[in-house]
Amino acid sequence: AMESVNAYIDALEDEIDYLYTSGPILAFARRLPEERIVTVVNASDKSVPLILPWTAPVVRDLLTGRKLSPRDGTLFLTLPPYGGLLLI
């Protein structure tokens, strides 16, 4: 049973790209056949700015439905305290 769990974890790791892993901020992308979903988490009690490269013209947060507009291939975010975003 443990071998199958490890195989599953290994398969997931192949599909995940870590974009930012500093201090209380974690951002990673999960590649699926039809799309890429980016998860961003702020584990701090303060708002934190974060800049990510983003090539799509529009970004949507799946948690709130809010649409964001990258500028010149860059997405400028302000993460709320203990908050997160699920971006496509």
Image (spheres, rainbow, N blue to C red):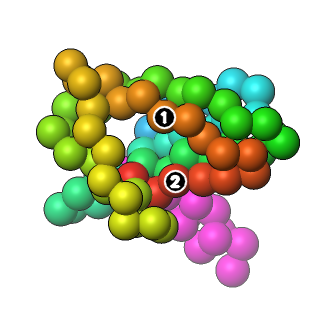
Helix or strand or loop: what does disc 2 sit on? strand
> In this image, 46 relative to 86: left or right?
right
- The image quarter in which residue 32 lies: bottom left
- The image quarter in which residue 43 lies: top right
Alpha carbon distance from label 1 to label 2: 10 Å
Number of marks drawn: 2
Asked whether residue 28 is in view, the answer is yes
Q: Residue at x 23, y 57 (%)?
A: 35
Q: Which mark is residue 77?
A: 1
From this view, report whether residue 67 is shown above or below residue 68: below
Q: Is residue 11 magenta?
A: yes
Q: x and y percent of residue 70 in the render? A: 27, 32
Kindly identify which residue carries mark 2: 85
> In this image, 16 relative to 45: left or right?
left
Please tell me whether mark 1 or mark 2 is closer to you in this view: 1
Dominant SS in magenta? helix
**Label 2: few (<14), some or many (≥20) within 10 Å?**
some
From this view, report whether residue 84 is shown above or below residue 3: above
User: Mark 1 belongs to which amino acid?
Assistant: Leu
Q: Is residue 2 magenta?
A: yes
Q: Residue at x 36, y 30 (%)?
A: 75
**Label 1: few (<14), some or many (≥20) within 10 Å?**
some
Q: Quadrant of the C terminus?
A: bottom left
Depth check, front residue: 25 or 67: 67
Q: Which mark is residue 40?
A: none
Residue numbers of the magenta segment: 1-16
Depth check, front residue: 37 or 86: 86
> In this image, 68 relative to 3: left or right?
left
Q: x and y percent of residue 25 in the render? A: 67, 35
Q: Residue at x 54, y 66 (%)?
A: 8
